[in-house]
Image: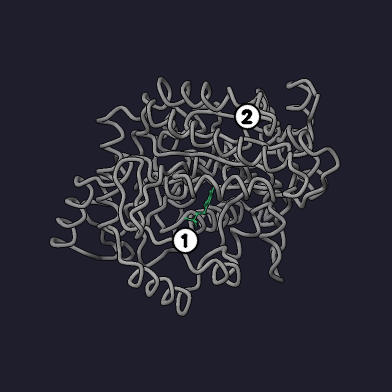
Amino acid sequence: MNLPFEADHALQQDDLAHHLHPFTDHRQLAADGGPRIITHGQGVWLWDTQGRRLLDGMAGLWCVNVGYGRPELSEVARRQMDRLPFYNTFFQTSHEPVIELSKKLAGLLPEGLEHIFYANSGSEANDTAIRLVRHYWQAVGQPQRSVIVSRKHAYHGSTIAGASLGGMSSMHDIPGIPIPDVVHAEAPYAWESGKGMEEERFADAAARSVEEAILAAGPERVGAFIGEPIMGAGGVIVPPAGYWQRVQAICRRYDILLICDEVVCGFGRTGNWFGAQTFDIRPDIMTMAKGLSSGYQPISAVAVGERVVAPLLERPGRLPHGFTYSGHPVAAAVALENLNIIEREGLVEHVRETVAPALAGGLGALADHPLVGEVRTLGAMAALELSPESIQPGGNLPLGTVATRVRNLCFERGLATRAVREGLVFAPPLVITTDEIDTLVDILTGCLDAVAAQLREPAHG
Ligand code: PMP
């Protein structure tokens, strides 16, 4: 849709006047003249009010796994809205979509995860996981096990508990966060803290940091460890081989529950249905959102393993927890159809067999680019760490300056990507083709070349 300039401008002004955006510097947004307004999407492509086309290198926000413009999903939503737009699942009632979705998920989840609780967002799923962990330990007579171990650079959401679990310091900038009884171990982030270290030694060191956090808190006080199989928003931090095996062994040693946050990694992104399968993790609790409905409806889920669910199923009393929209019928119906699409179209295999090697090949070739320090890819996820200092030794630009410049140029040239610290991350819709991956890599390469050339001119440094 190509809006006349005045109409587009009026929309931007209304947005600036009334819309508070998440994670946005509103003064900067106003200085930039307002937001880019997205009108529609098809496959991996987005269009804005000025008729510009963007290749969505981030699947919305790591979520539009099946791509944009799926009539199957709108049809299912319309049918469910006509039939039953809402009913709660609190008071001894249920409905078909939530029952069918639960059965479907139980069939896809790793063995031992058979029971599913629903919420609306990844943050709420992680809040729910904490409450379930604490409920469990209380039920088995160890209520003091309230500490949750998370990691630096983790992202687990933006509610007070989610932000507390998160390990990015900027998320703790609002007073009161982190809440008590959340502690953070180091991330398995070799680019930051394991340069030049042999992979196995680094896996050891990163896992040891988890154990140290447990020991510092007192193992008898620790209820759970939470981790994304691959850290997404923290910068697509792919752990070294053997890391997860070590972390699992540590959790077992101290009898600590393991929560996998699959909000990003779930539903095909890593080349298996779940990141836990890619890394052979056996979680007690798994949280999911995003790709569960490919973002077509807000819905999240918490899969609860046999051990944690037992007190809920076997003891009298109820869990004092739930949301109005837990298992919302329209969201559940859309999620179910979305899972059917992923299955029907073999998207998990497509990631494993086509997307993963093409991204690894295309982006991997950029490792030799003068502006690139490291490339990491796994499945349909990737990160580039930039190294401006290799072009401008001692340049001392504030962290993130160069990645932001590359990101902005990518948007101008038709590629949506995201800057994290001095790097860029990618997580395109899983339906992306090899031709579209070539386009992504071409645009990105041109932008890296242009910013590298700017950096070589001292006036622009
Ligand atoms: N966990 C992870 C791993 C995430 O990436 C996110 C969102 N990016 C969340 C939880 C929070 O999800 P939401 O924004 O839906 O609350």
Question: Which quarter of the figure is the N terminus placed in?
Answer: bottom left
Q: Is residue 294 above or below residue 317?
A: above
Type of amino acid under label 2 = Val
User: Could you tell me residue 152's position as x and y percent?
Assistant: 71, 47
* Residue 375: mark in rendering: 2
Q: Horizontal placement of 445 versus 354: left or right?
A: right
Label 2 crowd bin: few (<14), some (14–19), many (20+), radius 10 Å: many
Label 1 crowd bin: few (<14), some (14–19), many (20+), radius 10 Å: few
> At numbered mark 1, what does the secondary structure look like: helix, strand or loop?
loop
> Can the viewer see residue 309 in this picture?
no
Circle count: 2
Q: Horizontal placement of 453 versus 428: left or right?
A: right
Which mark is nearer the camera, 2 or 1? 2
Type of amino acid under label 1 = Leu
Contact check, label 2 and label 1, Cβ < 8 Å: no
Q: Residue 36 is drawn in which quadrant?
A: bottom left
Which residue is labeled 1 in the image? 319
Residue at the location (79% across, 50% down)? 217
Q: Is residue 183 above or below residue 370?
A: below
Residue at the location (21% across, 52% down)? 74
